Amino acid sequence: MEADMKNLKYGMVGGSFDSYIGDIHRQAARMDNLAELKAGNFSRNLEKSRKTAEIWGVEPDRVYGSWSEMAEKEALREDGIDFVSIVTPNDSHYEIAKCFLEHGIPVICDKPVTSHSRQAEELLKISQDKSLPFAVTYGYTGYPIIRQAREMIEAGTIGELLYVRVRHAEDWVISSVDPESKEELPWRFHPEKVGAALCMGDIGTHAEQLLEQFTGLHIHRLLAMLGTWPKRVLPLETNGTVLLDLGDGIQGELWASQIAIGKTCSPGIFVIGSKGSLEWTHETPSILRYTPLNAPTQLLEAGRSYTSEDSQSLCRVSAAHNEGFLEAFGNIYRNFCEDLLAKKYHIPGKRLPYPTIRDGYRGMKFIEACVESSKKGNVWINLE
């Protein structure tokens, strides 16, 4: 991008000053100086929203009492926002995203993108009809070494793909939910807020997208077994084991858990090919384990000269220095913003991919298929 190009302007719905995920989005958006926060409806509480704006340097006249007002007024401004970042609970993503798309404003949204696949499909159609970019923040896919793995697989380095094992394991539910407590459970535990799934929607979709972005494969069919701890307290699942049919005879398995004691945040993937294997874990996010057939394992490190040009372009620090989740999240914002800038200023050339509304739609289909499979007694469900 040209050095003197103006930054994009963006607004945020949700994500007030005391919001964890809101701050993640805000820091990720400003990491490459490509976007400035100029407007917001940060909270249903207007005073809290105004306080957030004051802390983050947003002008008072661009703090709105509702997201619908924000979409309408920003669309009419000559200096209106170039995109909106949606960081509200799951149940509101659809109507907010639809409103901004209908006002011609591109969207970047937290996952899962909607509560139902039919809503995600509608957003996909609107974004396509209006040619509006729509990103979904599957943050773990933004690590540079994930791009390296994808390019190695596409180049045939590990041969014909045979098997994939992917996971996302955490212990926060079993370590933080007190079955004896009389206090109301947080919003994540309420079906009317999150939809039909807890674990598979919250982190299972991260594993599903890690598989897709790492390998380029899509899930054709699945068979799921979901379980809940403790059943008498939580209405939705906290653990899921899923068998996968990835097409062309490629098998897979996916495990997502929020009761995995000892695992604070542990996504990972292992891919077996006919000529070798690749393995990545979040505990060492800059390292890709590459094992050629009948040869010693090699540890490929992000940022090294032997990695691909695209992978290197995503690195923010020199090799041997640690990069983390915030930087990976920032890469999704960067690729999205560069796409918007290229469209706005008609700049040709290659741009790096990011998870889109199409990925969000497949994520919703994945969640619903898992729930359906489990409820029907662990049967195979088609996704494609």
Image (cartoon, rainbow, N blue to C red):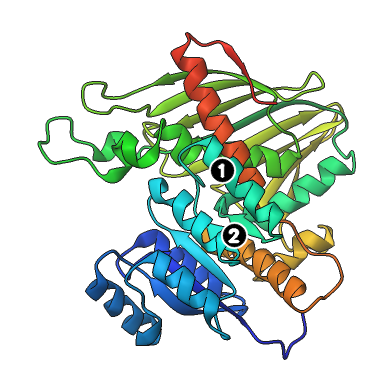
Label 2 amino acid?
Ala
Tell me the SS state at disc 2: helix
Which residue has dot 2 on it?
A: 328
Marked residue nearer the N-terminal end (2 or 1)? 1
Give the spatial CA distance, label 2 vs label 1: 24 Å
Q: Quadrant of the C terminus?
A: top right
* Residue at 29 percent of width and 44 percent of height: 187
Label 1 amino acid?
Ala
Q: Are marks 2 and 1 in contact (CB under 8 Å)?
A: no
Q: Quadrant of residue 163?
A: top right
Report whether 332 appears left or right of 216.
left
Seen in the picture, residue 138 relative to 65 is either above or below; the reply is above
Residue 169 visible in image: no
* Residue at 16 percent of width and 41 percent of height: 184
* Residue at 31 percent of width and 66 percent of height: 43
Q: Where residue 83 sits: x, y (%)?
A: 57, 69
Can you tell which mark lies on residue 120?
Answer: 1
- Mark 1 residue crowding within 10 angstroms, few (<14) / some (14–19) / many (20+): many
